[in-house]
Amino acid sequence: MALLLTVLFVALVFEYINGFHDTANSIATVVSTKVLLPRQAIALAAITNLVGALMGVAVAKTITSGLVDATFVSTQTIICALLAGIVWNLVTWWLGLPSSSTHALVGGLCGATLASAHGQWSALIWSKVTAGKPWWENAGILYKVLIPMLTSPVIGFTVGLLMMSGLYVWLRNWRPSVVSGVFGKLQLASAAYMGWSHGLNDAQKTMGVITLALVAATKAGALGGAPAFLAFLKTPDMGASPVIPLWVKLTCAVVMAAGTAAGGWRIIQTMGHKMVKLQPVHGFAAEATAASVLFFAGQFGMPVSTTHAITTSIMGVGCAKRFSAVNFPVVRRILWAWVLTIPATGLLGYLAMRTTQQFGW
């Protein structure tokens, strides 16, 4: 029981850090274009994150049953996975790099599970094809993580570039003051859409991890003698695709919103000021593009990186202006953080779990 409560605490710490780490993804553009002040933007993101987090479970179910074999997952495994994600998120936040909390959690979970299985690679679900269904309904790391990881940045960049190019053609005879005034108002809607999509996709990851911990604790008999006031911890369905309890949804949504309210100015500066200089029309195009990528991915249960979606959308919008408008040295630093996230957190999760095994935990 103590271990289960520990994993719940660590999971919520991760969710809180995810909130302030990824806040920048939701509000960098609306702050950098000066449509909203930072506190106003954070409040908008917190509210829309909360609403979005309560409106779906497809991504959460992918985390609980689509990436690793739950047979090898214990509460210790989940603690190690979460700690790996927390460490990586804090390091990249300190450096001002918009890395992916999604991939940090996935990498940590895969690494810790591999160690828990004593190096049996079969513990990781690489691909699980369901006959007669489209590829996006297949399970496994290949279909739910790697393919979206490669395609979502390309889609974000391409759609951002095309949308901004179309807007340039449409608005070429508008006065700059009119463009700024109109799109300053439209950006309020696109920022809210971005925050909602962020909550819909990102908050569900921790919902899935907590449910996975409840499944592991139930299988281990840890909840058998739980006090009556902890009866809510028992998960109603222990099948292949467990039910995400309502209290898990509510708790994750509120904690993520609280983390969002804490802000993340370091990353806002990188995305909204250093990478591309943005006007309201650019911010609208980038947010609308990224939010749509997150929304559609969430419908298919794909834990897509908010960071990748918004960053590549901003790059696409900047390149529509002119390629020199993008600060490519900054982009290069961001890309390195993306490439390293899953391997680094996988290694951290593996080493953390191996260390606990050495101490007999």
Image (tube, rainbow, N blue to C red):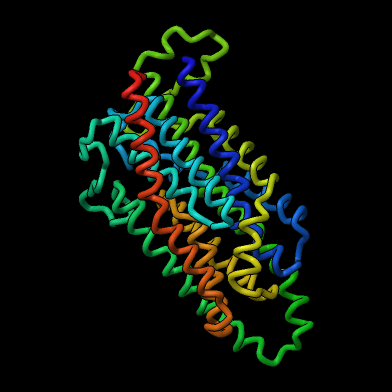
Residue at the (47%, 42%) spot, across then down: 85
Task: Indicate the position of residue 299 as horizontal and vertical percent values.
Answer: 45, 52
Q: Residue at x 51, y 74 (%)?
A: 328
- x, y percent for residue 62: 38, 43
Left or right of 177, for residue 237: left
In the figure, residue 236 lies in which quadrant?
Answer: top left
Nearest the camera: 21 or 138?
21
Q: Position of residue 309 (x, y in %)?
A: 50, 62
Instruction: Count all numbered tags in the image, as a single digit.
Output: 0
Viewport quadrant of the C terminus: top left
Q: Residue at x 48, y 26 (%)?
A: 7
Pick whichever, 54 or 4, lies toward us: 4
Q: Nearer the viewer, residue 215 or 347?
A: 347
- Res 34 quadrant in image: bottom right
Q: Is residue 81 above or below residue 129?
A: above
Task: Give the side of residue 288 with respect to residue 217, left or right.
Answer: right
* Residue 308 locus on image (x, y percent): 48, 61
Q: Is residue 123 left or right of residue 304?
A: left
Residue 351 visible from this viewpoint = yes
| Residue at the far bottom in the pictured view | 173
Residue drawn where x is 59% and y is 50% of the image: 94
Is residue 160 at least partly visible in the picture? no
